[in-house]
Image (tube, coloured by chain):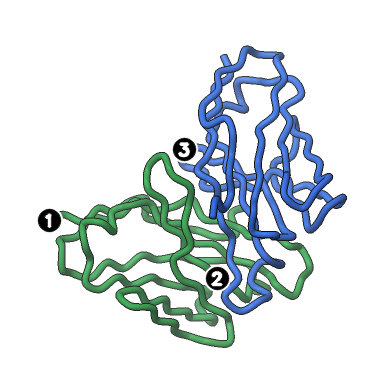
Amino acid sequence: DQQVKQNSPSLSVQEGRISILNCDYTNSMFDYFLWYKKYPAEGPTFLISISSIKDKNEDGRFTVFLNKSAKHLSLHIVPSQPGDSAVYFCAASDTQGGSEKLVFGKGMKLTVNP
Amino acid sequence: NAGVTQTPKFQVLKTGQSMTLQCAQDMNHEYMSWYRQDPGMGLRLIHYSVGAGITDQGEVPNGYNVSRSTTEDFPLRLLSAAPSQTSVYFCASSYSAWGTTSGNTIYFGEGSWLTVV
């Protein structure tokens, strides 16, 4: 039973346009969400996070939106750049549950074409 | 600042052999963990540690052992390698429990590619 779902395995966009990466979760106890970016042959690197007390967090070109009622979050990249081409992982945590665990989605490959 | 260092980067094992993947961090992080990444499966937690002397199982612990004798090191042992353990392994560390400290996040090593034949 997958608790964090990234249903689209890949996305291709043109440079300069918006990239929207979606993530759904099933565990209503999740209250902290993160996005990681991973280049081939490298470890994942932290991109942006959001707490459940917020519905939006912005950092430069990256914005994460959280819709708690729909158990859905999305990562917007505007404008998209070729260097953004990578695999993006959504992750979630129940910070009050004491499980000390971060649950990852399967990842989504973003390709930004010049 | 080295961050999280994993060794070896590549390893080929025969079925039944044992080996240890090393992981060290120099950030004085209390929390460390091991993940494996398989095609179409994302990152799955193998074992984790909330501090020296404390370890616990993650989502896929079978076939792996860990220990945490120091804050810096968190080795992962494969006791009797099986082809199903062919994967990319990532060690990670974090200052505190996931998400409980503002701005806290997990830092990953570069990965260890393991093939069991």
Left or right of residue A2: residue A22 = left
Q: Secondary structure at mark 3?
A: loop
In this view, A60 is above or below B14 = below
Residue B80 percent across, percent down from the top left: 74, 20
Q: Which residue is mark 1?
A: A114
Numbered disc 1: what chain?
Answer: A
Is there CB contact under 8 Å for labels 1 and 2? no
On the rendered image, what quadrant is the C terminus of chain A found in? bottom left
* Residue under numbered circle 2: A33
Counting every numbered tag in the picture gives 3
| Mark pair 3, 1: CA separation | 27 Å
Q: Colour of chain B?
A: blue
Residue bearing mark 3:
B39
Question: Alpha carbon of mark 3 to alpha carbon of mark 2: how far?
Answer: 23 Å
The hue of chain A in the figure is green
Compare residues A65 and B35 and report the one nearer the observer: B35
- Residue in the picture at 62% in, 12% down: B14
Report crowding for label 3: few under 14, some 14 to 19, many 20 or more residues within 10 A (C-alpha).
Answer: few
Tag 3 and tag 2, C-beta contact below 8 Å = no
* Type of the residue with mark 3: Pro
Q: Residues within 10 Å of mark 1 (few under 14, many from 20)?
A: few
